[in-house]
Image: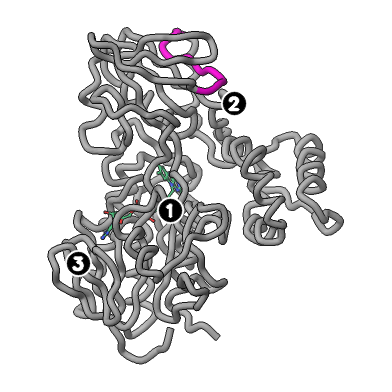
Amino acid sequence: MTPSVRTVAVVGGGCAGVLATRELLRGTGDRVVLIEPDEPGGGLAYGSARPWHLLNSRAGAMSADPDDPGHFARWAGCSPGEFRPRAEYGRYLRDVFASLASEDRLTVRRSRAAGLSATGVRLADGSEVRADGVVVATGNPAPAQPVGRPDHPDYVADPWAKGALEAIPSDVPVLLVGAGLTAIDVALTLTASDRDAPITAVSRRGQLPLTHTEVAAPPVGLALDDCTTLRDIVRAVRAEAARAGDWRAVVDGLRPYLDEMWTAFTPDEQDAFLRHLARPWECHRHRMAPSVGARVASLRQDGRLEVRAGGIRSMTAPPAGGLLVELEAGVQWFGAVVNCAGPGRLPAAAGSFVGSLLEAGQARVGPHGLGLDIDPAGRLISAGGRVQPDRWLIGPLRRGAKWETTAVPEIRSQARGLAIPVG
Ligand SMILES: Cc1cc2nc3c(=O)[nH]c(=O)nc-3n(C[C@H](O)[C@H](O)[C@H](O)COP(=O)(O)OP(=O)(O)OC[C@H]3O[C@@H](n4cnc5c(N)ncnc54)[C@H](O)[C@@H]3O)c2cc1C
């Protein structure tokens, strides 16, 4: 971006939008208009988290400031190795945002963006925010939906929707579609109050996220110079994990190189990774806090949570309510089915704003439909293949062009990149 005084509109005021706003105000002379319908600093992960939802990263990894890794831990008054509540992290983000409030170059528009115009951002109320540059920070695509999803009140398509889980009675068996971190969040919420009826989580592999150790092993660097294919890398990672004693050290040591590796894969290798390795990788990479892992283990031991491998063949709605679900083991009745699959693929899972960018040709779907296409600096690429010099993307929608793009350390460095002129 050029250093002259300009107006940049940041669309979305979740974690990425707040960090982008902070970097733009601190690192440039730009005026910033943040467009967000809710209070800035909320968003999917931290906005409506309950007390039992903990960060899956240690406090020392969660600073808003790339130059000051201890900022969040000091703010929270904790040690960098602790796993703090996600709601507390939301308060931290709101506090970070509040510290910018006295800045007269900042304007907040509590509204929803509907699309981009030649001169800025169109809002849902029909007005326009005039801007020289735009940062798209609207978060994840909508959740993926299982084949044959019913349009039924006992099917919860989006577990993050307000009130979605509170409406589920505590005396009916519940099926969770998916066994990742979202399913863990939902299981913790459903079992936070008295619940006798069992919860079943079903996913293709029946694999839950793994757990952090109380004390982190230092990351182990891996020599990958001799690896030319995905297969070579997998072999090297397995061998090093066996040697290192704690596989977590190897997984964590790989993190800084993952984007480089992902972009070096051929499209076929990326595809093979997505089909066979992405899920096991996520289980190892995005781990539960130790106390969450212990709680999940005790729920399983008590028979309150069962995890099964396999697919869902069909779902039908009997007249008496609930859903009849055909699983590998046969047909079973559940009082509610909660979709806990991760983000869906574009263009189907684009919300209305991203959908409008695609429709207008202002953006195009990126590799494998995981996000939007960008150039190496993070600028959107139009349907015609042209880099859009003043339209930027940060956060989870960079996935596909990048691999590691959803966690705070990556988002804060993307935000910092917005304030650095492209050479
Ligand atoms: C459950 C969960 C737990 C996580 N835990 C961790 C963790 O422990 N550690 C870690 O490093 N990472 C974690 N992450 C990952 C990461 O921190 C989040 O994905 C991150 O919050 C992404 O920020 P975001 O701003 O891109 O998206 P969000 O936080 O979802 O924010 C998007 C914002 O955009 C707004 N918006 C959407 N559409 C429009 C529109 N048209 N106009 C205006 N505004 C709009 C929304 O209202 C929302 O506020 C977690 C993610 C999830 C989902």
CA gap between label 1 and label 3 equals 21 Å
Within 10 Å of disc 1 (Cα), the crowding (few <14, some 14-19, many 20+) is some
> In percent of the image, x 19 and y 73: which residue is there?
107
**Residue under label 2:** 205
**Where is residue 368 drawn, in percent x and y?**
56, 53
Q: Residues within 10 Å of mark 2 (few under 14, many from 20)?
A: some
Q: Quadrant of residue 259?
A: bottom right
- Label 2: state its secondary structure: loop
Residue at which label 3 appears: 123
Is 297 drawn above or below residue 365 in the view shown? above
- Mark 1 vs 3, N-terminal side: 3
For the rendered model, the colour scheme is one colour
Amino acid type at circle 1 is Pro
What kind of element bears circle 1? loop
Q: Nearer the viewer, mark 2 or mark 1?
A: 1
- Which segment is the magenta one? 302-311
Tell which circle, 2 or 1, labels the residue nearer the N-terminal end: 2
